[in-house]
Image (tube, grey):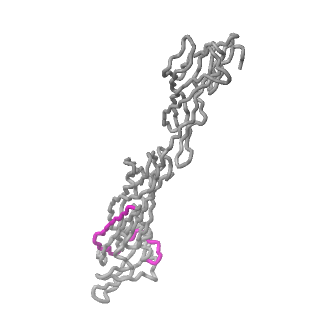
Amino acid sequence: MRLPPLRYLLLAAFGALALAHVGAGRVAALDPINVVVETWTSDNGHAYVGVHAAGHWAAPATRTDFVCSDYYSEWQFQGAPQAYYNFWWIFVHRCDDGSTVNFDSPVTTHTSSERPGIGIAPIAFGDLSLYLSVAVEPVTAPARSERTVTAELTAGWRDWVDDAISAYVVRNSIRVERWTVDFGDGTRRTFPGDGSDRLATTHVYGEGTFDVIVTARVTGQAYGAFFSPAGVPYEEIVPFTLDISNRASGVAALPIEYVPPVVAVGGSPSGTLADGSVVAPDVDGHTAVWWPRGLHCELYVRPIIEQEGFMRSGGVVIGGATTRLVSYRYERGVNDAGDATAPGRYDADLPIAIQWNTPLPGQQAYPVRLVLSLETTYDDGTVRTSEVSGEVAVTVIYSAVSH
């Protein structure tokens, strides 16, 4: 709670004298302070808290009370020039030795039943304006990308604190008790306030357009006090709670296009040549190969990736991909091998056992027809399958010819 030091509360009444707790020759009689708090909120981030404090004090009583610290006041009744109108001199004394500070110039004032004296305002107002800002960064992004949602509460204050009456919202009482975030896609989460006026969280959106609504549950205290001529505070503290909301509109999650790879059918031959040398399969595929007549061949199926797949959103490439051969289907063709592979589907690492005993005239080639089953894994983990048909052209050469 913020209670202004009494030396400041009474300063205006005593012409800039350094008054603190004041002992009155006669203490004032006061009615209880009445504090009214009203709150108002909108759905666009604005909220207000208004404090209204009212009090009434009467003429000093006949008894003596001392509330000493640095100074105290002595009220001397000077008469009643008219009905319900009393005139006073006010002397200020040091508490340590009783000496008079304003012996030559006492404060003069009056009291009446109709209005307060010494410049007292019987009604005071204070208010608090709040604003909740909400943002999403980035506003536009590909679907399934992580966004940062932030909310921040800012406050503006206006207080009435004077020599006799005070009304304000206690600044260090303002707390965000909890944050509630409606992400706009059916997801709703609540976060504890944990003493901060700022929230930051992340969320992943599917494809679409969304409005994010953040609501802050705010708690606080309003304070009202009325001070007697002796500086004694009559206080009331009123707690309040309000919900303030705002939104970030037009949050867009753009569709992601998974562009498939461009793949050609290829093969890599292996086996033992007539001179006994061994041809090992290479990792790259070829659409056209040469092989000696009458020699057993193991033809490994290879996908030739001319262009790898990639991810695109809003016309911008946002990720790549990796494609691999899962299996293939070998279709019927010329095969003179004794252990010839039958047409059918095979795992990617199994070669085709094949042989050609007759070279074709000119540049004619035997086609090995294949259907590749491919699996493409994109950078975001998405997996797509596809099939590519094609053939490997095999030119059969005489054993004495080498390539």
Q: Is residue 125 magenta?
A: no
Residue 165 percent coordinates (x, y): 37, 72
Q: Is residue 397 above or below residue 126?
A: above
Residue 23 visible in the picture: no
Residue at left offset 37%, top offset 71%: 125
Residue at left offset 48%, top offset 21%: 344
Residue 257 percent coordinates (x, y): 50, 43
Residue 53 visible in the picture: yes
Residue 77 percent coordinates (x, y): 34, 82
> What quarter of the picture does the N terminus occupy?
bottom left
Residue 399 percent coordinates (x, y): 69, 14
Taking the image as shown, residue 392 lies to the left or right of residue 7, namely right
Q: Is residue 15 magenta?
A: yes
Q: Is residue 312 above or below residue 394?
A: below
The magenta stretch spans which residues? 14-43
> What quarter of the picture does the C terminus occupy?
top right
Q: Foreground: 129 or 238? A: 129
Q: Foreground: 241 or 377? A: 377
